Amino acid sequence: MAVASAAYAELGIDAEAVERALSANMTFPASWYSDPKIYAFELDQIFARSWHLVAPADQLANPGDHVVARAGHVPVVLTRDREGALHGFVNVCRHRAYPVAAGAGNRKTLQCRYHGWTYELDGRLRSAPGCGFEEQFDKRDFSLVPVSAETFGGFAWVNPDPDPPRLRDAHPELEQLFDDRAVSFDGYRYVRRYTYEIDANWKVYVENATECYHCPTIHSRSFSDAFDVSRERYEYVNVGRILAQFTDYNARGRRFAHATAQDDRAFRFVYVWPSSFVALDDLVAFSGMIIPTGPETCRFDADMFVRPGLSEQEVERRLEMYTLTLEEDAEAVRIQQPGLRSRMVAHGRLMPSRESAIIAFHRMVWDGIREGTGA
């Protein structure tokens, strides 16, 4: 506890006050959404120790395939080696920190384009120009730094921790939830990626994404016109470190008034702590990853998928609804962030009947901070 108390003091955290606020359905202190010390702690103690969805698994189906991503602040590269094994590494050359891969593709090796250090797909240093002239230079000492990589649910996942619990152990409820609620991207084809640079703390964006209390006002022309956002029909499922939402098509909306759901519910959404999102209806799906980029900024990458056979007109009509929704979310949290930065309202009051997911999310963050301080 002495270590935790010292860490709390360093971060300016009053643990008892935080517990009182969370127990009373209040939000975190406003300062937590802009404080550089809190942000740096979250990167090291939460994002660097968690699983993150990075790409469709079929982008790593063949020997030589590789993808790059960011797991929080950690640049990563995933590879499929010549024997078919999946690997994950920090995407940083052991010479002077230049990346060894850019984008997705297929290669026989990974190579830093700064000075030409070349690595095997299993991370071993293959060659470094001029290394034969150096004393006490052993290539075996300079392999790429490993991270953990797995596939699950049709996606590749990465954890910067080289020895974490397996994804299924970290989120034991995930597989059953995917099975029970028809959360599957089988039969969808990849279309394109949309990237949103967001002027708000990453927690603000997660809070927005995991509740639909704001949908009737912020998304009246987009999501709410497509799906039923009424309190009676909109369902929240908060289990473990997973936050999910389910609802039907909006029969009175203009967008999909005559649509009927083929599966359990028309719209299914799952957030997996701390950065990963999947969402789908019967014809369109997207996976998303939130990437903190600063105490008051983040990025959201959304990979869009559609059912084969959908007309181009229908593809664009569906994607327009989702992209408009995401643009509206980005604008809403941008407007929200200065109010948090002002710290003039120390805490907000949550509405448990519509914001139970935010309450659960706050517990995840608080648990992550407590675990990181050794409490």
Image (cartoon, rainbow, N blue to C red):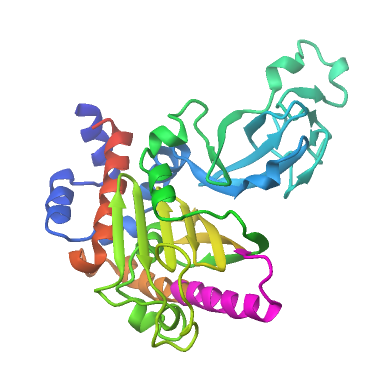
Percent position of residue 319, x then y: 59, 74
Looking at the rendering, in which quadrant would you find the N terminus? top left
Q: Which quadrant holds residue 106? A: top right
Looking at the rendering, in which quadrant would you find the C terminus? top left
Left or right: where 110 falls relative to 229: right
- As rendered, which of 77 and 240 lies closer to the eye? 240
Percent position of residue 150, x then y: 56, 35
Looking at the picture, does residue 177 appear above or below residue 302? Answer: above
Residue that appears at 13% across and 45% down: 16
Looking at the picture, does residue 176 appear above or below residue 330? Answer: above
Q: Report how many numbered discs are placed on residues in the image.
A: 0
Left or right: where 190 falls relative to 165: right
Give yes or no for residue 322 being in the magenta stretch. Answer: yes
In the image, the segment drawn in magenta is 305-329
Looking at the picture, does residue 104 appear above or below residue 244? Answer: above
Residue that appears at 24% across and 68% down: 354
Left or right: where 302 falls relative to 337: right
Report whether residue 34 is seen. no
Report whether residue 312 is seen. yes
Give yes or no for residue 125 being in the magenta stretch. Answer: no
Q: From the image, give the main secondary structure of the stretch colored magenta.
A: helix
- As rendered, which of 218 and 83 lies closer to the eye? 83
- As rendered, which of 317 and 248 lies closer to the eye? 248
Percent position of residue 73, x then y: 53, 46
Left or right: where 297 falls relative to 88: left
